[in-house]
Amino acid sequence: MATRQFVNTAAMVLAIELIGGQLLTADEWNQFLGPNRNGIVPAAMGLLDSWPAGGPKEVWRVSGGVGMSGMAISGGQLITLVQKSEQQWLVALDALTGKLQWETALAPEYKNAQGDGPRGTPTIAGDRIFAYTGQGILCCLNRANGSLLWSHDVVGELGGKVSEYGMSCSPLLVMRSEQV
């Protein structure tokens, strides 16, 4: 049986409609399913009720790799995971132009019969980005330059095994307040 390749839509093609010079997408779609993890875009964003004739205007397009990662967008920066050159990469692009800001290799390529590449959507929190690779490596990177701050092979460290589909966690940050 042939292995199907899933193309990372964030890195291959991104159609962004501009309204008054601002991104149509949420300004802070910083994690899986958006700021509240519910997939709901606030009405104040002014989304279209229907596509214009001929579809939305394509603003930019960049080559990517394979994978199933979603996009996180914050402060004009788009972050996603792709697989290319036998590695899984965290990639930062300018959300308005598609220009590559940086890319950091996180792990060896991930392959399986259900589709190659990373699956989880990165999470942006302040000056940090958190990402989870297809084989279960949790990473934290500096948002400004993509430098790796730490990584843990969660599956290996806990004595587990990679799921049949591959690891598809999209990191959830829970902030706690310290009470004095």
Image (spheres, rainbow, N blue to C red):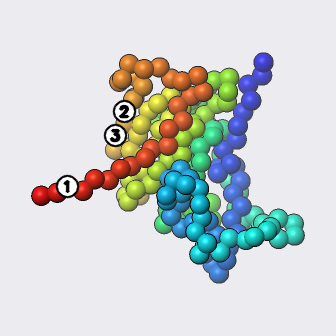
Under circle 1, the secondary element is loop
Under circle 2, the secondary element is strand
Number of numbered discs on residues: 3
As shown in the figure, which amino acid type bears the numbered disc 3?
Trp
How would you rate the neighbour count of disc 2 (Cα within 10 Å): few for under 14, some for 14-19, many for 20 or more?
few
| Residue 152, disc | 2
Instruction: Using the image as rendered, state which of residue 54 and residue 64 is in the foreground.
Output: 54
Measured as percent of width and height from the top left, residue 138 is found at 42, 37
Measured as percent of width and height from the top left, residue 11 is found at 65, 50
Nearer to us of marks 2 and 1 is: 1
As shown in the figure, which amino acid type bears the numbered disc 1?
Glu
| Residue 150, disc | 3
Q: Looking at the image, which residue is at 80% across and 67% down? A: 51
Q: Are marks 2 and 3 in contact (CB under 8 Å)?
A: yes
Q: Looking at the image, which residue is at 73% across and 25% down? A: 3
As shown in the figure, which amino acid type bears the numbered disc 2?
His
- Considering the image in quadrants, where does the C terminus appear? bottom left
Measured as percent of width and height from the top left, residue 104 is found at 48, 44
- Considering the image in quadrants, where does the N terminus appear? top right
Instruction: Using the image as rendered, state which of residue 79 and residue 155 is in the foreground.
Output: 155
| Residue 178, disc | 1
Residue 100 in view, yes or no: no
Under circle 3, the secondary element is strand
Quarter occupied by residue 26: bottom right
- Determine whether, in the image, residue 106 is placed left or right of residue 179: right
Report the Cα–Cα distance between label 2 and label 3. Answer: 7 Å
